[in-house]
Amino acid sequence: MGTEGSSVVVPRSFRLLEELERGEKGIGDGTVSYGMDNADDIYMQSWTGTIIGPPNTVHEGRIYQLKLFCGKDYPDNPPSVRFQTRINMTCLNQETGVVEPSLFPMLANWQREYTMEDILTQLKKEMMSPQNRKLVQPPEGNDEARLEQKGLALKCCIV
């Protein structure tokens, strides 16, 4: 029937439904979670992730909210990832909270098999890395939502 070595490519919508189901069930020890922002989003593009800071780091006990945006080319290309909660990490643009692909190998070397869960889990591991585990963090309660990129441009135009 099939040829040896051939693989089935799961359609984007099926893949995202699988990820949604996994996210709703909870992941591992519960310190990483994610779900859709809007159940009416038929393209399943906008997601929210949560990471609870790992123990024995400056992140311990803190709750970090992230936005993940899966474009129409996901999972062939990675989602864009942005921390909404202020955090100091070496793989982020400190102004926008965007996880910079050039500074975060999982996004730079994206593979179709990777998932949003993998990204959140890897970001949690990054919090535990020697370069991030002791970085001075913004004060807690400083969780004002970061401006969207278009919001920054709009603000510049008005001022």
Image (cartoon, grey):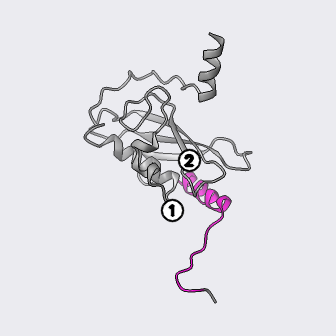
- Foreground residue, 109 or 128? 109
Classify residue 31 by image quadrant. Answer: top left
Residue at horizontal 34 percent and vertical 40 percent from the top = 127
Which structural element holds mark 1? loop
Residue at horizontal 74 percent and vertical 50 percent from the top = 42
Image location of residue 33, percent across then percent down: 50, 46
122 vs 17: above or below? above
Q: Which residue is mark 2?
A: 79
119 vs 136: above or below? below
**Would residue 8 be counted in the magenta stretch?**
yes
Which residue type does callout 1 highlight?
Answer: Glu
Which residue type does callout 2 highlight?
Answer: Pro
- Say which mark, if any, is on residue 19: none
**Would residue 30 be counted in the magenta stretch?**
no
Q: Start and end of the magenta stretch?
A: 3-26
Q: Which residue is mark 1?
A: 113
Image location of residue 19, percent across then percent down: 58, 56
- Foreground residue, 125 or 31? 125
Which structural element holds mark 2? loop
Specify few, some or many for label 1: CA neighbours under 10 Å numbering under 14, 14-19, or 20 or more: few
Q: Disc 1 to disc 2, how far (Cα)? A: 13 Å
Residue at horizontal 55 percent and vertical 43 percent from the top = 80
Are dots 1 and 2 in contact, CB under 8 Å?
no
Q: Residue furthest bottom?
A: 1
- Foreground residue, 122 or 139? 122
Residue at horizontal 62 percent and vertical 67 percent from the top = 10
- Foreground residue, 137 or 95? 95
Disc on the earlier residue, 1 or 2: 2
Image location of residue 134, percent across then percent down: 26, 33
**Quadrant location of the C terminus?**
top right
Image location of residue 129, percent across then percent down: 29, 43
